[in-house]
Each structure stands twice: as C-alpha cells, then as structure tokens.
Image (spheres, grey):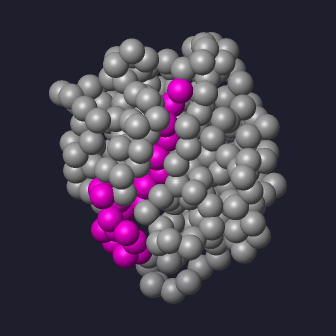
Amino acid sequence: MKILFVGDIVGKPGRNAVRQLVPRLREQHALDLCIGNSENSAGGAGITPESADELLEAGIDLLTSGNHTFAKREIGPYLNRPESRQLRPANYPEGAPGRGHAVLTASSGARLGVINLEGRVFMKPLDCPFRTADRLIESMRAQGVLCIFVDMHCEATSEKNAMGHYLDGRVSAVLGSHTHIQTADERVLRGGTAYITDVGMCGPWDSVIGLRKENAIERFLTQRHSSFDLAQGDVHLQGAMVEIDEATGRARSIARVQQRVAE
C-alpha cells in the first residue's frame, strides 16, 4: 500500500497546490490513498465545510486537523455528519464534535486505520495522546486492521519523537504536522514504523510558516499584534510518501515530498 500525507494546507494557496499536484502525484506514484492536514485551509487558520470539500474533491481521501480545528464556528455540524471525512484530534475531551479516527478502504480492498492526535507540550491540556493511541490501536486491531497511520500534530519535536518510539512496531507510520517546517529525519524505526518529525506545509514558500514575512517580523520586533495575512506566490506542496506491507502492517519505506506549484 502506498499512501501520501500532505502537511498543513495553508489557505487558498495551499488548496491550489493540492488541486494542481495531488492528482498528478496519485497517478505518477500509483498511490492507494492520500491524507492531508486541513486545519489551516480556511484563510490560514481553521476549516470551513467549503475548504474541506474543495480538498476532498481535489483528490484527498481523508482530512486530519489540529489545534485550529474549531477556529471557524461552522465546522462543528460538518464534523458531526455521519459521512464526514474530516477528522479532529482524537484526544479532545468527550463531547467535542466529530471523531478522531477512521478506517479507509483503498480500491485494492486494503484497509488503513487513521488516527489524528494532538500534542500537549506548549499546547492545550487535552487528554493524553499516548493513552488515546493505545485505546484506538487496540480497537482497530480488534477489527482486523493491520495498517495504521498516525498524524501527530504538535509543537514539541520531543513529543513527536517520543510518540514515534512509543508506537514503533504497533502502527505503520507516525508522521508529524503543525510546525509547517519540513524536517530531514525521515526513517523507518526498528520495529517497522515510518517516522518523520514534520512533513511541512502546502503554502507560500517565501513567508513565515505561510504568513506575510513582514507582518511576522513586525510582531517579533515590537511584541504587538500584527495582521494575519497570508503570503502569496512561490507555493510548494510538502509531505511524505510511505509504502506499507499490507500483510504485516510494517512500513517498507518513507520519502519526503516537495514540489513547486507552476505559476
């Protein structure tokens, strides 16, 4: 099984990158499934039903998210739809709209369990992502799901790294999101789990994590609020491609992806 995970999709530039490049990547690499993190897809912070639907129509099979999931009020009812393909982190407290996991079926008939987690270091004090992962992995194994993918959405590289080692041998991949900066530590861990600290973002390259660099610099210089404006131009799609042995659930390989959108 070959899967592609694309990093934080930032606003309209990121959505355009997905629309232009994901169908091409699916065909070029004979991908079985594509997953993307959509938490910044609406204006750079949050998700709307329209931004999620656009990404799904562009060739993504399932959307994950993170700490900006609920930035737009209208996303709650959308998450609660029985047929929704937009996840929120599984370790939100009971009563939060939506769900944090799903099982996808590829055209080949192969099944992939997907778990969306959010870290707690420098972030909200959610339920424990490690214990949440334990519970969901056990449930998926009981359903006969061998291949399991985890989006670990968090700030601290140490927390992501710890999750990778904690789940090594129990899931097929632990891929990090949230920082918008692609790291160069992709590898298959000893137990057979593909890992990378952060897959990067889909958005404007000449920016500060997708935002106009002038505004971000001004905020650092003055410690005052500056407008939250998306950068434009020089857009890249970043992510990671993982190949999984369907018979064992172990990863065979992981490779970083970075492609520039034609202007």
> Which corner quadrant holds the C terminus?
top right
Q: Residue at x 45, y 31 (%)?
A: 145
Residue 18 location, quadrant: top right
Residue 20 location, quadrant: top right
Q: Position of residue 151 (x, y in %)?
A: 45, 46
Q: Residue at x 44, y 29 (%)?
A: 144
Rendered view: 231 above or below 124: above
Q: Between 234 and 64, which is closer to the camera in this rendering? A: 64
Q: Position of residue 257 (x, y in %)?
A: 49, 29
Q: Between 130 and 124, which is closer to the camera in this rendering? A: 130
Q: Magenta stretch containing residue 99, yes or no?
A: no
Q: Residue at x 50, y 59 (%)?
A: 89
Rendered view: 56 above or below 9: above
Rendered view: 182 above or below 133: above
Q: Position of residue 186 (x, y in %)?
A: 32, 32
Q: Residue at x 44, y 78 (%)?
A: 221
Is 6 on the left or on the right of 46, as rendered? left
Residue 209 can be seen, yes or no = no
Q: Which residues are magenta?
A: 111-131
Q: Magenta stretch containing residue 129, yes or no?
A: yes
Q: Position of residue 201 (x, y in %)?
A: 53, 46
Residue 71 can be seen, yes or no = yes
